[in-house]
Image (cartoon, grey):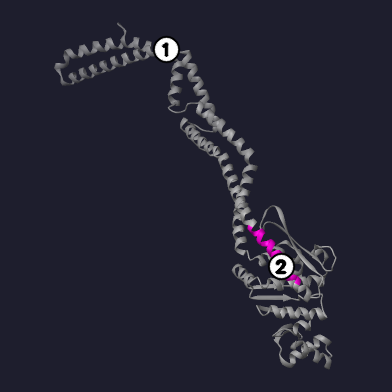
Amino acid sequence: MATLRTLGEALVDIHSQHENSLLGQRDFQFGVVDAFAKNVELIREYNTVFDQYKEVKSELENVLVNEASLRRELDFVQFQLGELEKANLDGLDQQALEQELDTLNNAETIKSTLDGVCRSLDHDVQGVLPALKHAKSSVSKIESFNQSLGEFSKRLDSCYIELQDLNREMEAFGEGISTDDRRTEIINEELSQLYLLQKKHGLNSVEELIRLRAELAEKSQGFGNFDERIDELKNKVDGFKIEMTNLAGQITATRKKAAIAASSEVKKYFTELSLEHAELVIDISSSKDFHAFGLDEINFLFRANKGGQLQPVKAVASGGEISRVMLAIKASISKHKQLPVLILDEIDQGVSGEVGKKIGSILKGMSEGMQLLTITHLPQIAGKAEHHLKVFKTTDKNSTSTFVKEITGEDRVNELAEMLSGKSISKAAIENAKELMNN
């Protein structure tokens, strides 16, 4: 349907009664002048750039509106990132720090306990090692008596060696244990900061904090391109403005020439339509900003009588005058706008008699270059047509039907006569109808 509608607009121009009101509307007025100017391609090129300009301008406006909140978000992200970077998380072993802190906090207990254990192992009289050494020596003296005794001797020897090594290691470990208030303070500070960051961000490990730091760094970098994005959009907007200014300037030049030509051509039709002293002036002025039609403002100014003041056509023209002005415009642009079919629905509204006859002559001239369909109640217009279609209704008991019938010959003469004099057709009406068809 959309495709057919687009095609239809290119093939058929339908002008109905209510469309006389379009005469005072900007879109219609630009359409008339642009038809005379033949700048369709130029306007299409301008509209392509204008659509891009609106899209980029809208994006820029949204960015600028959100700039303050985005900058506040950037400050917060950078603050969080600074905290994480200050924590020196790389290579930090939380478990090792916690273990070292436990050792420092319990250094005296560890040292005294290990010292007591070592003394119990290697005491001269009651120590485990002297007793084990004595037992090993005693069994070795009898190991030759039985193979199992030899195995016992070996196992006692292994136990002795293992306990000696264990004793030495515990002694060394205990000697290495010392209280270090400064180190304890440093570890406490590091862990407190670590616990605070984990609680603040709802995380449980150093690895998770490092991943968060990377995410914040990436986000901060994205914000860093914020000003660049604004500059990029501003440059695009400025570029489109330059391009549109150039195209709009060309369009304005063609319109100003076309406005003069259109006014002159419409004036010729005014004379034929009994508007000898009427004048239509198309005023082209500059607009403050770009819009879909360029950088122009347009106004159709009209006066019906000599010496009258030019005013917007919609404000000063009567109903009959508007119909004739619209017909003059349609007749003029039909020579400049390629439309195979033009349908006029009661373009003769508000006129009659001699003016209607003149309208019929104009329509006949227009029909030489296109297919023209006219809906009318004026015999002066109907008589000028090459084909006459009558629309009528019939009613029975249950329904009403509408028909369209082509009438020719005597039927057509009678139809025109009836339009002239009513149901009681006079001989004079018949003669008048024949005259309308022949002139």
Q: Of all residues shown, which one is farthest toward the top? A: 125
In the displayed structure image, the side of residue 343 where residue 234 appears, left or right: left
User: Residue sitting at 55 percent across and 38 percent down?
Assistant: 223
Q: Judge whether 416 appears above or below 102 on screen.
A: below
Q: Where does the image place residue 259, in percent across and percent down from the top left?
A: 71, 64
Give the magenta range: 250-267
Judging depth in this view, the residue of 206 and 3 nearest the camera is 3
Instruction: Please tell me whether mark 1 sits on a helix, a strand or a loop.
Output: loop
- Real-space CA distance between mark 1 and mark 2, rounded to the nearest whole angstrom: 106 Å
Q: Which callout, 1 or 2, points to the residue nearer the camera?
A: 2
Q: Judge whether 100 appears above or below 306 on screen.
A: above
User: Residue sitting at 59 percent across and 59 percent down?
Assistant: 45
Judging depth in this view, the residue of 422 and 260 nearest the camera is 260
| Picture quadrant where residue 388 is located | bottom right
Q: Residues within 10 Å of mark 1 (few under 14, many from 20)?
A: some
| Picture quadrant where residue 23 is located | bottom right
Whether residue 416 is visible here, answered yes or no, is: yes
- Name the main secondary structure of what is drawn in magenta: helix
Q: Locate the N terminus by quadrant.
A: bottom right
Q: Judge whether 200 appears above or below 345 on screen.
A: above
Magenta stretch holds residue 252? yes
Q: Report the residue marked by disc 1.
A: 178
Q: Report the residue marked by disc 2.
A: 262
